[in-house]
Amino acid sequence: MTLFTPKGIPVASFNACGTKPFIGASETPHTAEAKIDFVYPEVPFPSNLLFQTWGEENIRKMVRHHHQLLRKSVIGNLFPANDEMFNFATEKTADFFVEALGGEKCYTPIHGHPALRMRHFHITIDEKGREIWLMMYKKTIKDLHMPDECIHEFWNWIEPLSIRMINRRTTTADIQRHAHDAIWSEV
Amino acid sequence: MTLFTPKGIPVASFNACGTKPFIGASETPHTAEAKIDFVYPEVPFPSNLLFQTWGEENIRKMVRHHHQLLRKSVIGNLFPANDEMFNFATEKTADFFVEALGGEKCYTPIHGHPALRMRHFHITIDEKGREIWLMMYKKTIKDLHMPDECIHEFWNWIEPLSIRMINRRTTTADIQRHAHDAIWSEV
């Protein structure tokens, strides 16, 4: 998507721009236009349907299951090696999911605003890391039999949300989207 | 700077948005708006004034001097440890600068389009790495007495150009700019 400045000047992404022939300096200087990397899409938060339907304990089990899958994955090294630290991180994430999905305020009073992008800056998260995080949620949802009527809203939240954690780019390509209908029709 | 979609919907940066109070799920879903990270500013390429004034050999010396400074800096680990490899990388960069500044086509016929952002993806370059790269050029320009009348154009090229190599974000803050007038008034 091409965005525009307030004055109507287009600012395309590196990917959309492609590569023009390289021109060395001559007597007349030229200018390469401003660019953006990519647009982090909007994030539709879910209603409290999942919380109402599944309850806090299932949401906590979901987060624990997901973290166990991540730990065994190729991005397992991004998580604490120490069991106690790993479990602490897992429960903190579970607190976030419980509060975000409509449960009690068990995260923000202790940790403050989630500010998820900022909170993940100390971990290198590239496009592939985000893919794995997301696909492990797909497996978790199936493994734990999340109620069918809740999957759409939940997926449409975590899919764009996961993009916000990307802080290391390894390509100019657009971020791969995984629309609910595409990813769940095959299940 | 806030950018707009073709339909006039604003897409601000993470930095410009700040942090709104966190709202957990209720019966009514809400949506976090789309965002960008930052705008990579336009890059004004220099004329061939520096090449005409200083010549190829001084440009090559400049690149070698800069690389030696980088090698001794805290980002020295981003460069090949092996001398032969390091010198090969240095001479390739010198070829690029010679061609880009108006000299003979000694880079693109061998290596193809510079595509500098893409070419640097295998190296982790964060905001601090870019600062060091740039400040080592400031020192190089002074150490080697680049002709005064050429500094403005050269600096106004490499300063925004260096931003394009950033592929690891560690903050939502805007990228620090180093305008020619601000950076050279103190010299």
Image (cartoon, coloured by chain):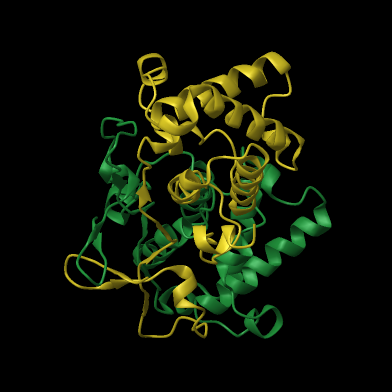
Chain colours: A green, B yellow
Taking B86 as reference, is B178 left or right?
Answer: left
Residue B132 vs B23, above or below: the answer is above
Q: Position of residue A76 (x, y in %)?
A: 67, 43
Is residue A88 at least partly visible in the picture? yes
Q: Position of residue A21 (x, y in %)?
A: 26, 30
- Label tally: 0
**Residue that appears at 59% across and 22% down:** B89
Tell which residue pokes out farthest to the left in this image: B7
Taking A164 as reference, is B135 left or right?
Answer: right
Q: Position of residue B25 (x, y in %)?
A: 45, 81
Q: Position of residue B158 (x, y in %)?
A: 48, 45
**Residue that appears at 64% across and 62% down:** B186
Q: Quadrant of residue A88?
A: bottom right
* Quadrant showing the N terminus of chain B: bottom left
Residue B176 vs A128, above or below: the answer is below
Is residue A187 at least partly visible in the picture? no
Taking A134 as reference, is A118 left or right?
Answer: right
Which one is in front, B117 or B31?
A: B117
Which one is in front, B20 or A153?
A: B20
* Quadrant showing the C terminus of chain B: bottom right
